[in-house]
Amino acid sequence: MCGIVGVVSHSPVNQLIYDALLLLQHRGQDAAGIATNNGSTFSMYKANGLVRDVFRTRNMRSLPGNSGIGQCRYPTAGSSSEEEAQPFYVNAPFGITLAHNGNLTNAEQLKIDLFKNDRRHINTDSDSEVLLNVLAHEIQQCSSGLSLDPSAIFNAVSTLHKRVRGSYAVVAQISGYGMLAFRDPYGIRPLCIGFADTEMGPEYLVASESVALEGLGFHYLRDVMPGEAIFIDNDGKLYNQQCAENPSLNPCAFEFVYLARPDSVIDGASVYATRLKMGEYLAEKIRKEMRSGDIDVVMPIPDSSRPAAMQLALKLGIEYREGFIKNRYIGRTFIMPGHNVRRKSVRQKLNAIGSEFKGKSVLLVDDSIVRGTTSREIVQMARDSGAHRVIFASAAPPVKFPNVYGIDMPTRGELIAYGRTQEEVCREITADALVYQDIEAMKQSISDVNPALKRFEASCFDGHYVTGDISTDYLDRVEYARAHPKIVAEDIVRTQLNLNLARAE
């Protein structure tokens, strides 16, 4: 999960990209970067940290140009090294910068193919650098000499779709030509485009979420379709083409549950409205499973679950109260590395209002339960504040399977619901009762808001991987790599040495 943005304007874009990244900060808090294009020259600055901490006045002054891209990063593949902050850059052909949101499921094989067949070298463990080099190679293959036109670019993206597997929403700049944006054939990760009319002609902004468009005065035009590529040349002329053979829209359900801002619209569905619907369906299930009078008060776990909790309380006719106050200067615990760090930050992030809990049977509503660390701490905080009974409700179904498409939940053993019954999870988080949303109800919540959405990437809930290339062996390899990064790195170096020897012979 990362936030990406690309802009083609008639005036300097450095401040515009910076402001867009602030609006997308919730999508990645590990690193941030901006690359601008001024004529045939790229300028780039990137570093670890929040957007506001990465860029200083001197950095902004070093980013001239009327077009550019940016990213705020949350690492799911590779490491947290500053070297893997995006955008990435290659100087041939033409010079290309790229920022990527998602995760390639065949990145390791592509690395070997790039080194062995395409004569391209990868400097980091980032799958985004792999994606950039695949794109650069295909553009080189499709271009005629020293010139490049939109049809050649679209042909390159078409071939890329055939080589690359996984999820990817991409913005890229081609020096001297313009900006390219495209989305994987399954439409897993979100990407939308907006425009602003100016006296000098239209300006375009591409971003992960519509909130970045609206917050900067751009009009939402539409979402980039699965498999589609959009190219905007340096004169502001827009070209688009479907580049995948059999595209199908399968947006990530977890975007609606947790990742996206509630004021965004993704693939025609308001995130806020879908969360209200999730609250309605969860209320129906609670009404069936619990007696009237078992619950005195409904409380959300700030912030993502608030719409669902409000609607649930309304449907059940139970008082809604705010029992936890959030410190907004603490990062999102779900994306923090390490059990102990997440556990400590829960207490720093939330503070309970004791008077709201004392002697009450409390229904706590959260957007989801992933590792269970946060849930367990919150239940204990409610008890410490005097709650008579603590019932926990999740607006999402049990997270039972790893997500390999750009969300950091790759290890089955880290997921509290994996291999456990609902009753066992309830005991693990020390709640008196636990209610999960049903999978079909979650999907229907999104379809109710936009009936055109029929299929979803919901692998972390149902174990179905839409790209069709994820096996138990693949998940085992991912988990092994996560547990033994040094051994895997040595294996990669050994493989490259063997390829070097084979090439020399």
Image (cartoon, rainbow, N blue to C red):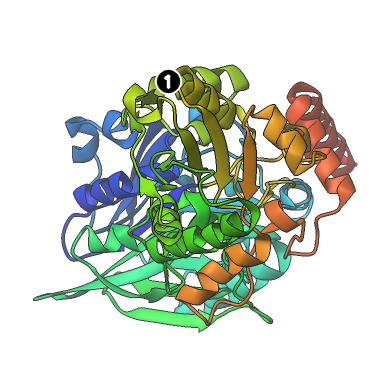
| Residue 30 sits in quarter | top left
Residue 416 shows up from this direction:
no
Relative to 91, say whether 176 is above or below.
Answer: below
SS category of the residue bearing label 1: loop
Residue 170: % across, % down: 50, 59
* Front position in the image: 276 or 313: 313
The local crowd at label 1, few if under 14, some if 14 to 19, many if 20 or more residues have their Cα within 10 Å, is some
Residue closer to the observer: 61 or 334: 334
Left or right: where 84 falls relative to 63: right
In which quadrant is the C terminus drawn? top right
Q: Quadrant of residue 164?
A: bottom right
Pinpoint residue 381: horizontal percent, then vertical percent: 48, 22
Q: Residue furthest left?
A: 199
Residue matched to label 1: 385
Q: Residue at x 60, y 46 (%)?
A: 407
Q: Compared to 290, does 270 lie above or below? A: below
